[in-house]
Amino acid sequence: MIMIKKRKTIKTKNNVKLKFILLAGLLFLVMVASLFGGRYHMEYGDVLKLIEAKLSGVSYPGFEVAEHVLFQVRLPRILIALLVGAGLSIAGASLQGLFQNPLVSPDILGVCSGSGFGAALGILLTSGMGVMTSVLSLGFGLISMFLTLFMVRAKGQAQTMSYILSGIIVTSVFSALTSLIKYVADVNDQLPTITFWLMGSFANKEFNDLKIIILPIVMGIAGLLLLRWQLNILSLGEEEAYSLGVNPQAARIAVILFSTIITAACVMVSGIVGWVGLVIPHISRRIMGVNHEGLLPASMLLGGIFMVIVDSVARNLTAAEIPIGILTALIGAPFFALIYNRMKGES
């Protein structure tokens, strides 16, 4: 009997490893394929020669334009899409586990609306997407989280519903403030910039944008991965968590803080990209199960794959680039309807 259980455990671990290898391989293939897509056509052999030349540190004469497009336009954009998709997905999976609610997404605490307001304010004050806009976006994202936590603490009931209702209040306030900024913005310059940014996009992203977000997103992802065991224990209840040596309040605040940092950084660089943090964790749960040990890394990989594919579609489907938020909504809304229908059937 013990031998049978041991064999089953080994088989399960091997299956999990195989799934991770397949996901990582798929991510690599999607990223490589995305390098070829775009308005500037490049032959397969030229791309390989340019990559080989870049790795060996030599120049490839006569292909300066192609080299610029490949390494200065497409590569940073793909890496940013990868980070944003991975970050939003792991934040969504963590918050769904924390609140024990499959309909929770990273904007549940009002972070997206707060960051959106900060970016809109930055565009209004500077008429562009400069450093101040990024700083205000990140700052107001964090402020929205602290406002939500303050209202929960003031009520004295740190329950799931308290977080959700407080997040709705904060979201409504910052959404109204964003509408006010759009109302007073210049209709020829600032208003189109704010509107297009709020729909989400990776257009014109450079390595400088990647440098700004890589630290907060990687730090947030690392923090959530370290807390995956606490998320499993928190699902058992507060008394069980205390008995197993986990402070549920401290773990809950840590998960919220890391998720907020990731979400604010993503919104800061790409605008508001909805549905990713809601849809991808559900698909990951189907593949890896509910154990956060495998669920969080799988969500991270699947989120990266999903966002790189969506970004490729956004810049290749039509002559004018489609905002990312429109595509993710077109995919996410039917999926949400499917979840709702299933929940209705279960009830």
Image (cartoon, rainbow, N blue to C red):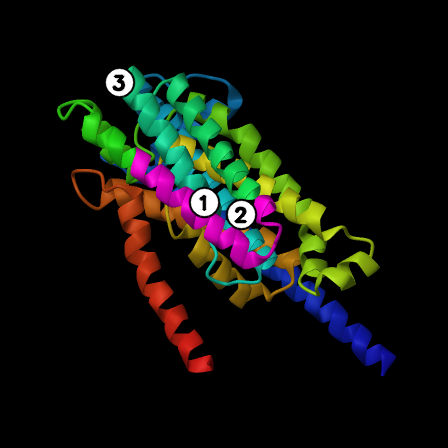
Circle on res. 127? 3
Q: Magenta segment range?
A: 152-177
In the image, residue 72 above or below residue 157: above
CA–CA distance between discs 3 and 2? 31 Å
Q: Amino acid at mark 2?
A: Ala
Q: Is residue 317 left or right of residue 48?
A: left
Q: Is residue 70 left or right of residue 56?
A: left
Q: Nearer the viewer, residue 186 or 305?
A: 186
Q: Is residue 73 left or right of residue 152?
A: left
Sequence-wise, the earlier of marks 3 and 1 is 1
Would you say the magenta stretch is mainly helix, strand or loop?
helix
Circle on res. 91? 2
Q: Amino acid at mark 3?
A: Ser
Q: Nearer the viewer, residue 69 or 177?
A: 177
Q: Residue 78's quadrant in the figure?
A: top left
Residue 211 at what x, y percent from top left? 49, 24
- Residue in view at x 41 percent, y 18 percent: 131
Residue 242 at what x, y percent from top left? 80, 57
Residue 212 at what x, y percent from top left? 48, 24
Circle on res. 326? none
Which residue has dot 1 on it?
85
Sequence-wise, the earlier of marks 2 and 1 is 1
* Residue positioned most to the front: 155
Sequence-wise, the earlier of marks 3 and 2 is 2
Q: Amino acid at mark 1?
A: Gly
- Image quarter of the N terminus: bottom right
- Residue in view at x 38 percent, y 53 percent: 275
